[in-house]
Image (cartoon, grey):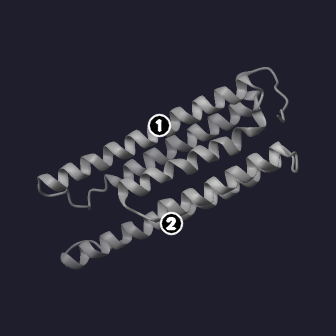
Amino acid sequence: MAETTVMNGALSRPGSRFVAIGLSLMAFFTVLWATWSSASRLPSPAGDESQRRGRALQLGFGITFASEGVVIAIVCVLLAINGGYAYFAPAIALVVGLHFIPFGFIFGRTIDFYIAGWVVVWALVGIWLIASQTIDAPLVASLVGVATACGTAAYGVYMLRVKRAILATLAESDPGAAPAR
């Protein structure tokens, strides 16, 4: 297993930095999602069935997202115990990629499966590159990080397009409504 240098201090360890960055990004996107999903311009679901479906979606999202954070923490602890600091970035990317799979089923969207496939493939390539010592671990972490960022950015663009389509549809049904942004 390839190892990276471990210095004194929690945030001087490369693995700790990856975890801190990953958890910070998770917190940022959670706030972003909460802001987007609670947009006051979107109507509340009407009827008991719509409200039940909405609660089920929120619960599924919350469980999946919380599980992702727990699994990332466990994986990082196990890697750190075994000296596998070099594997932190692709391991975190693997968990991030896998968390899109339940979203595909929960929300009934195929985009989630495409994003999952993209991120998981790059994470597995990163693990292989480190294990085979083909490329230095910091470069692999960068490649996997950029690939993961591209996947999540594509997901963000998709979500913005969906929001605009919803707002445009609402604006068409209510001519006095504000235009979609």
Image point (67%, 58%), residue name: 147
- Binning the other alpha carbons within 10 Å of mark 2 as few (below 14), some (14 to 19) or many (20 upward) gives few
Query: Could you say which is closer to the camera, residue 14 or residue 102?
Result: 102
Q: In which quarter of the view is residue 39 placed?
A: bottom left
Query: Could you say which is closer to the camera, residue 131 or residue 50?
Result: 131
Q: Are marks 2 and 1 in contact (CB under 8 Å)?
A: no
User: In the image, is 117 to the left or to the right of 146?
Assistant: left
- x then y, percent, for residue 62: 38, 41
- x then y, percent, for residue 58: 32, 46
Q: Amino acid at mark 1?
A: Ser
**Location of mark 1 (residue):** 67
Q: Is residue 178 above or below residue 134?
A: below
How far apart are labels 2 and 1 at the CA level?
24 Å
User: In the image, is 17 to the left or to the right of 135?
Assistant: left
Q: In which quarter of the view is residue 75 placed?
A: top right
**Of the numbered discs in the image, which one, if any, rests on residue 157?**
2
- x then y, percent, for residue 140: 79, 49
Query: Could you say which is closer to the camera, residue 45 or residue 24?
Result: 45
Secondary structure of the residue carrying numbered label 1: helix
Q: Quadrant of the N terminus?
A: top right
**Of the numbered discs in the image, which one, if any, rests on residue 19?**
none
Image point (27%, 47%), residue name: 56
User: In the image, is 3 to the left or to the right of 181?
Assistant: right
Image point (11%, 56%), residue name: 47
Q: Earlier in the sequence, mark 2 or mark 1?
A: 1
- Binning the other alpha carbons within 10 Å of mark 1 as few (below 14), some (14 to 19) or many (20 upward) gives some
Secondary structure of the residue carrying numbered label 2: helix
